[in-house]
Image: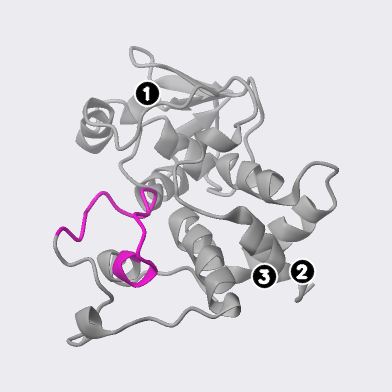
């Protein structure tokens, strides 16, 4: 599957959970599944569907494809730490996610665009690969020519999420980075990562 580029609120209503990385918008009073009869449908959740929904949450929130997620799952499974936690950490380490969590962009898709267009530096060097895996103590900054962009300044003024403790940010220099590994409490979406592990355990 490729990266989702369709209506974001529709996806949130379908999965029935806020995806803070996907969009700032809220469905407000339209909380049921999309479609004319969505409000009247009584969803039947099999165990397979429950696991699939948890997997889809993580895919759409972080904006990654099925192949990417599967590769990360293989890597997480080979770790000595809990597979679900390692998977979430690998996703949190992505450069586009760190740019978002530093409040340099309102969503992960917006952060991905900043990275891809060369506005973001890592340790003073341009990195235009959104999936670049940031390591603790590396410095993420906005290049000088981009520091006065309205969209960046507006995002800093009204952040989508609170700054997690594993990150640090200097608003005067527009730079920050990872100080430590994220904990489970730092993950901002409502998700059961063990169900994702169970989903892939039968397919790998």
Q: Which residue is mark 1?
A: 144
Q: Is residue 119 visible in this depiction of the protein?
A: no
Q: What kind of element bears circle 2?
A: helix
What residue is shown at x 50% (from left), y 70% (from top)?
Answer: 53
In the image, is residue 8 above or below residue 159? below
Q: Position of residue 14 (x, y in %)?
A: 34, 72
Figure check: 106 above or below 72 = above
Separation of disc 2 and disc 3 at Cα? 6 Å
Q: Which residues are magenta?
A: 12-28
**Sequence-wise, which precedes: disc 1 or disc 2?**
1
- Does the residue at mark 2 contact the one at mark 3 (Cβ under 8 Å)? yes
Q: Which mark is residue 199?
A: 3
Hey, which quadrant is residue 115 in on the image?
top left
Residue 114 % position (x, y): 39, 43
Q: How is the image coloured?
A: one colour
Residue 76 in magenta stretch = no
Where residue 99 appears, as percent x and y from the top left, is 44, 36
88 or 82: nearer the viewer = 82
Mark 3 packing: few (<14 Cα in 10 Å), some, or many (20+)? many
> Which of 42/190 is in front?
42
Residue appearing at x 42%, y 69% in the figure: 4
Q: Is 86 situated left or right of 54 in this image? A: right
In the rendered image, which residue does mark 2 sit on? 201
């Amino acid at each position: 599957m490729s990266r989702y580029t369709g209506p974001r609120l529709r996806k949130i209503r379908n999965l029935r959970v806020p995806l803070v990385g996907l969009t700032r918008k809220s469905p407000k009073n339209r909380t049921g599944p999309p479609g004319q009869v969505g409000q009247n449908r009584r969803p039947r959740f099999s165990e397979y569907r429950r696991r699939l929904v948890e997997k889809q949450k993580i895919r759409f929130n972080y904006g990654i494809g099925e192949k990417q997620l599967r590769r990360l799952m293989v890597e997480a499974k080979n770790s000595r730490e809990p597979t679900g936690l390692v998977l979430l950490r690998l996703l949190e380490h992505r450069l586009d996610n760190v740019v978002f969590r530093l409040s340099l962009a309102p969503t992960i898709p917006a952060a991905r665009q900043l990275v891809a267009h060369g506005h973001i530096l890592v340790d003073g060097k341009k990195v235009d690969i959104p999936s670049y895996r940031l390591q603790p103590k590396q410095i993420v900054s906005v290049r000088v020519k981009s520091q006065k962009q309205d969209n960046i300044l507006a995002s800093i003024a009204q952040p989508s999420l609170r700054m997690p403790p594993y990150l640090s940010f200097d608003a005067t220099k527009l730079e920050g980075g990872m100080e430590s590994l994220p904990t489970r409490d730092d993950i901002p979406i409502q998700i059961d990562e063990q169900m994702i592990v169970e989903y892939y355990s039968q397919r790998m």
